[in-house]
Image (cartoon, rainbow, N blue to C red):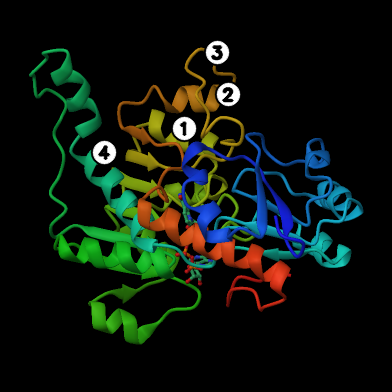
């Protein structure tokens, strides 16, 4: 680290986090990779670091931020897009700058949503296991053509738009809901904006691409599921708490839902990203979810492509450097 440099504590790191960030941050930033998550209990590990870098499941609440501030942290750099795990009001009060990665390959996330949809609908997850056991029976593997079916895209931001375009490519009718509709985009893509109730009642597939906010928390719950077409496939690669898991389980048990594909789960913190294969799963709702043949879960991996990791490292590295050089932070990345 040069005299003008600084050190940064990089919390909750996995081996793939270490590939691109050192080169992107440059020699003036001393990166301290920590494998555990940031919380009020672990904030002490960032003592003396001007910058702290976190991911989606670090708990950056007021208590944690107070401690970071007292230790001299100036920058909290999120290496993700969503920021629902950070108390921004507290950060603002304490004078800590918070940045995120406003955009990284939205194709990574959109393509994963479609991968889950295809795998679930055509029972690829079940077929894969069967064939390995030399069970070549096709019993129970019947899916449906996506062509000419209706997909409902909730949230037509960067990711939702790509999913919509891919599904149009399959010949699906695509309807969408977004409180800030882009009529010109929809007309170009042959997509129709509808109200949420109409979307729910028309769609054979519903995919969520919205941020988690107080308004969107449990947007999928018993009443909204009741409005959906029986047999609908629900895809969520956005944030777990968009869905009330208990209500989802009831709807799966009753056969109301055709299938559920998830890359996120409301209680994923401490479970997703970890190898718990030798332990007893303590989360009964997740355990129940894993028993359904028509539920496909991946552990928050939608972002995991080389392109997305490189984009994330580039923005995060530039923001860490900006703290040292005084240059502006990456455009669109500053939250406080
Ligand atoms: P974006 O900000 O480009 O788009 C979000 C869209 O949702 C906006 O158009 C907004 O108007 C709309 N919206 C907000 N509230 C809504 C509501 N109640 N109903 C319908 N639409 C609503 O965000 P982007 O980049 O498309 O990302 C979407 C979400 O995907 C993120 O918030 C994040 O939670 C999640 N994500 C998940 C990843 C993963 O690895 N699983 C990786 C990256 C993002």
> Is there CB contact under 8 Å for labels 1 and 3?
no
Tell me which numbered mark, 1 or 2, is placed earlier along the sequence: 1
Please give the residue where the numbered disc 2 appears in the rendered image. 283
> Is there CB contact under 8 Å for labels 3 and 2?
no
The answer to whether residue 180 is seen in the rendering is: yes
State the SS at label 3: loop
Tell me which numbered mark, 3 or 4, is placed earlier along the sequence: 4
Work out how far the residue at label 3 is from the one at label 2, CA to CA, in angstroms: 9 Å
Asked if the residue at label 2 sits under 8 Å from ligand 1, the reply is: no
Measuring from the top left, give residue 143's x and y in whole percent.
Answer: 16, 39
State the SS at label 4: helix
Please give the residue where the numbered disc 1 appears in the rendered image. 250
- Judge depth for marks 4 and 1 and give the one in front: 4
State the SS at label 2: loop
- Judge depth for marks 1 and 3 and give the one in front: 3
Residue reaching furthest bottom? 184
Number of the label disc, if any, that sits on residue 329? none
Please give the residue where the numbered disc 3 appears in the rendered image. 280
Work out how far the residue at label 1 is from the one at label 3, CA to CA, in angstroms: 24 Å
Tell me which numbered mark, 1 or 3, is placed earlier along the sequence: 1
Work out how far the residue at label 1 is from the one at label 2, CA to CA, in angstroms: 16 Å
Please give the residue where the numbered disc 4 appears in the rendered image. 120
């Amino acid at each position: 680290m040069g005299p003008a440099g600084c050190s940064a504590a990089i919390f909750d790191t996995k081996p793939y986090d270490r590939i691109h960030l050192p080169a992107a941050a440059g020699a003036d930033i001393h990166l301290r990779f920590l494998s555990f998550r940031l919380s009020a209990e672990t904030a002490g590990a960032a003592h003396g670091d001007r910058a702290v870098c976190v991911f989606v499941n670090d708990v950056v609440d007021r208590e944690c931020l107070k401690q970071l501030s007292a230790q001299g942290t100036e920058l909290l750099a999120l290496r993700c897009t969503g920021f629902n795990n950070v108390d921004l009001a507290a950060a603002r009060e304490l004078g800590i700058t918070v940045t995120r990665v406003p955009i990284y390959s939205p194709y990574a996330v959109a393509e994963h949503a479609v991968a889950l949809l295809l795998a679930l609908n055509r029972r690829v997850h079940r077929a894969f296991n069967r064939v390995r056991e030399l069970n070549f029976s096709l019993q129970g593997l019947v899916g449906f053509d996506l062509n000419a079916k209706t997909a409902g895209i909730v949230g037509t931001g960067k990711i939702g738009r790509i999913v919509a375009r891919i599904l149009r490519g399959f010949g699906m009718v695509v309807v969408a809901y977004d409180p800030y509709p882009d009529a010109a985009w929809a007309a170009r893509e042959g997509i129709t904006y509808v109200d949420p109730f109409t979307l729910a009642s028309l769609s054979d597939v519903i995919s969520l691409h919205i941020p988690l906010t107080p308004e969107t928390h449990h947007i999928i719950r018993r009443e909204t599921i009741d409005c959906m077409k029986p047999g609908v496939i629900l895809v969520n690669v956005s944030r777990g708490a968009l869905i009330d898991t208990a209500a989802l389980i009831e709807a799966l048990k009753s056969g109301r839902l055709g299938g559920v594909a998830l890359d996120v789960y409301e209680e994923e913190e401490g479970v997703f990203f970890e190898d718990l294969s030798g332990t007893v799963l303590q989360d009964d709702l997740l355990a129940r979810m894993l028993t359904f043949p028509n539920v496909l879960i991946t552990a928050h991996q939608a972002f995991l492509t080389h392109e997305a990791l490189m984009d994330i490292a580039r923005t995060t590295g530039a923001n860490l450097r900006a703290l040292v050089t005084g240059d502006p932070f990456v455009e669109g990345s500053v939250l406080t």
